[in-house]
Image (spheres, rainbow, N blue to C red):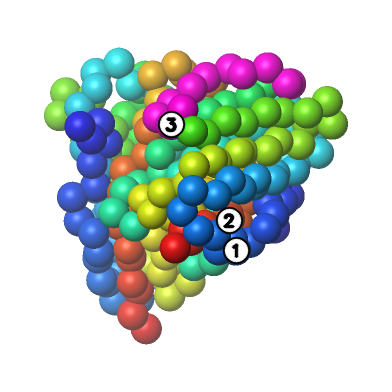
Amino acid sequence: DSGVTQTPKHLITATGQRVTLRCSPRSGDLSVYWYQQSLDQGLQFLIQYYNGEERAKGNILERFSAQQFPDLHSELNLSSLELGDSALYFCASSPDGAPGKLFFGSGTQLSVL
Amino acid sequence: DQQVKQNSPSLSVQEGRISILNCDYTNSMFDYFLWYKKYPAEGPTFLISISSIKDKNEDGRFTVFLNKSAKHLSLHIVPSQPGDSAVYFCAASDYGGSQGNLIFGKGTKLSVKP
């Protein structure tokens, strides 16, 4: 158990809809990251938050947005969903001073039909 | 344009033998490299890392080698055990790893046969 909690585990929705994925980081970790894993791709970095502030942005679509709340949990919002957005979405957190050492949740499997 | 490449989608080895997983990168600015292991229905877990100032790092049965001139790194597992069967991801960073926005390869599925 990594200590990172993601909900829901599975999500099935239709094209054009909007969904919210939720992540609770490990206790004490200020950084939260979101990654997308598609069938033919590795883990693609989407966005990072540190203590409520956006720290780094990767290949995140404009239809996607994220935020980190004062209690440090994070939400990833995906809107106007397309078939190609079907993927496994991972959240990870990391402690300060541990470069690159991320603790991943078990992911949310999103299926857009 | 893939900056981190794992050219072998799968690898099968016998229990007790050595497993060698390879990874190539193109960005010469990468200065920190990591390996993650992933079991089905779980998130990736950190395995071992190496800074660009070193060419080898060892942790128990796992050793990572870095060849900067060839932009190549490899993970050696000796001896391999059935419990090592998983997907292994190579990752790299160009910020000393501090920002955590790692660039991952597509993974190599290792099967260790008893």
Q: Residue beneath label 3, please?
A: A61
- Residue B37 within the segment the image draws in magenta: no
Mark 2 and mark 3 lie on one chain; the one further toward the N terminus is 3
Tell me where residue B17 sits by quadrant.
Answer: bottom left
Secondary structure of residue under mark 1: strand
* Crowd class of label 1 (few under 14; some 14 to 19; many from 20; radius 10 Å): few
- In the rendered structure, the answer to whether residue A80 lies left or right of residue A52 reads left
Locate residue A12, reporting x and y percent: 55, 63
* Marks 1 and 2 in Cβ contact (< 8 Å): yes
**Residue at the image position 83 percent from the left and 25 percent from the top:** A70
Q: For the magenta stretch, what is the residue range?
A: A51-62
Q: Which mark is residue B77?
A: none
Q: Which mark is residue A10?
A: 1
Q: Magenta span has A54?
A: yes
The residue shown at (52%, 19%) is A56
Q: Nearer the viewer, residue B108 or A108?
A: A108
**Disc 3 residue type (three-letter):** Leu
Question: Earlier along the polypeptide chain: callout 3 or callout 1?
Answer: 1
Mark 3: few, some, or many residues within 10 Å (few <14, many ≥20)?
few
Which tag is nearer the camera, tag 2 or tag 3? 3
Residue A94, image x, y percentages: 64, 33
- Quarter residue A29 falls in: top right
Residue type, label 1: His
| Residue indicated by mark 2 | A108
Q: In the rendered structure, the residue with mark 3 lies on which chain?
A: A
Secondary structure state at the residue bearing disc 2 = strand
Q: Secondary structure at mark 3?
A: loop
Please tell me which residue is depicted at 23% across the width and 35% down the height of the picture. B2
Q: Amino acid at mark 2?
A: Thr
